[in-house]
Amino acid sequence: MRSGLVAAVSSMILTACIPRGGDDFRIPSAPNSASGQSNPRITAEQQVVAETPSWSPAVVERNARRVATTGYIVQHGDSLFGIAVKTGAGATAIADANNLQPPYPLRAGVHLQIPGGLYHRVGVGETGIAIARAYSVVWADIVVLNALQPPYTLQVGQNLLLPSGTPAQSSDPDTTPESRAAAFALNIDDVVTGGTAAGAPNVAPVKATNFAGRFNWPVRGKIIGKFGAQGGGRVNDGVNIIALRGKAVGAAAPGLVVYSGNEIGVFGGLVLIDHGGGWITAYGHLGGIDVAKGKRVAAGDRIGVVGDTGYVTQPQLHFQVRRDRKPVNPLPYMIGSNGPT
């Protein structure tokens, strides 16, 4: 069930690639006088339009409750979710502990094992990312622990099992939601799996019946950053295409915009499009964004313009193709030659 570049050029490739760690991308911490780190290069005149995705941990009620391992006798009318509400444990955890398979039929009188652990009850408007930030844990770990599946939508009242060792309350009384957020690394996979608020209106998922994983080039230009290992422990999860600032960037295939903003500093202006069937494309360093989350786009539709936002020093587009949440080399999936600018 558990589911970028040569002298100036080479330095730019590196700025578009982050050392691979526990996440797909590890983002530099917030700037401070001790570290001498600087802000992502996002300038006001580029007018990156960013939505506010409510990822602040301040919107999360830290209500984690420690549940002891115990037993439960199924009563007439009980449902798996109802038992989870009664016991405080997670429905997935209960099903896993008792080898229950969808659609989880229950029979009165059956003894169920209720697995212990620390569980957070999801509230209205909470996102997976915000919950992870609130408890200073890794969202990807919560995804695995709770066997969350696409489209990764959280339900109000759902009990999420938190990683072992997570404190129910902060051990540092001076820790604030803002300081927890500043220390939190965010990557593309987190946005895909943990960026939708519980209780938000449902958007019909993209159907991929006829989609064969073939993509148009989002912009024409020379590839200055290739996919894969770059040396020095750096990895590029896409390709970087040099183009003039302000040049239109088009959707590589039909799909649904699942993120539009600049919350991941290394990429600056970023758009993510879900094409269905596990296929997602990412468009980074945008100097302007023309689509909002939830918008359906056709292949070639303008989603933004080339910029040099984020951790680059020259206008370019960082383009990724992801399949089943993992980045793949875009080139084998592209239609035709990228060609001249």
Image (cartoon, rainbow, N blue to C red):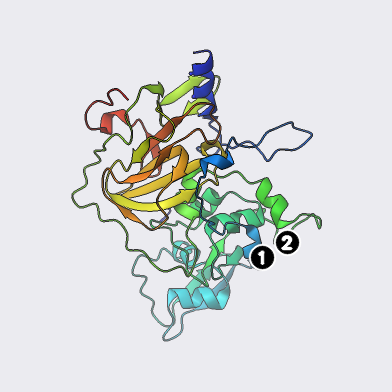
Say which label, 1 or 2, has the lower sequence index.
1
Residue 104: which quarter of the image?
A: bottom left
Left or right? Give the position of 22 relative to 110: right
Residue furthest front in the image: 45
Residue type pointed to by label 1 = Arg
Determine whether 204 is above or below 179 in the image.
below
Q: Quadrant of the N terminus?
A: bottom left
Label 1 crowd (10 A; few <14 / some 14-19 / many >=20): some
Q: Mark 2 = which residue?
A: 169
Closer to us: 32 or 87: 32
Dot 2: element: loop
* Relative image position of residue 322 (x, y in whole percent): 37, 40
Q: How far apart are marks 1 and 2 (CA)?
A: 7 Å
Left or right? Give the position of 119 relative to 286: right
Residue furthest top in the image: 7
Kindly identify the residue that appears in the image at 27 percent across and 23 percent down: 339
> What numbered label is drawn on residue 62?
1
Would you say the residues marked 1 and 2 are in contact, meaning their CB atoms lie under 8 Å apart?
yes
Asked if residue 219 shows in the view, the reply is yes
* Relative image position of residue 212 (x, y in whole percent): 21, 42
* Relative image position of residue 324 (x, y in whole percent): 36, 45
Determine whether 93 is above or below 288 in the image.
below
Determine whether 298 is above or below 252 in the image.
below
Closer to us: 301 or 53: 301
Label 2 crowd (10 A; few <14 / some 14-19 / many >=20): few
Asked if residue 3 shows in the view, the reply is no
Determine whether 136 is above or below 24 in the image.
below
Q: Quadrant of the C terminus?
A: top left
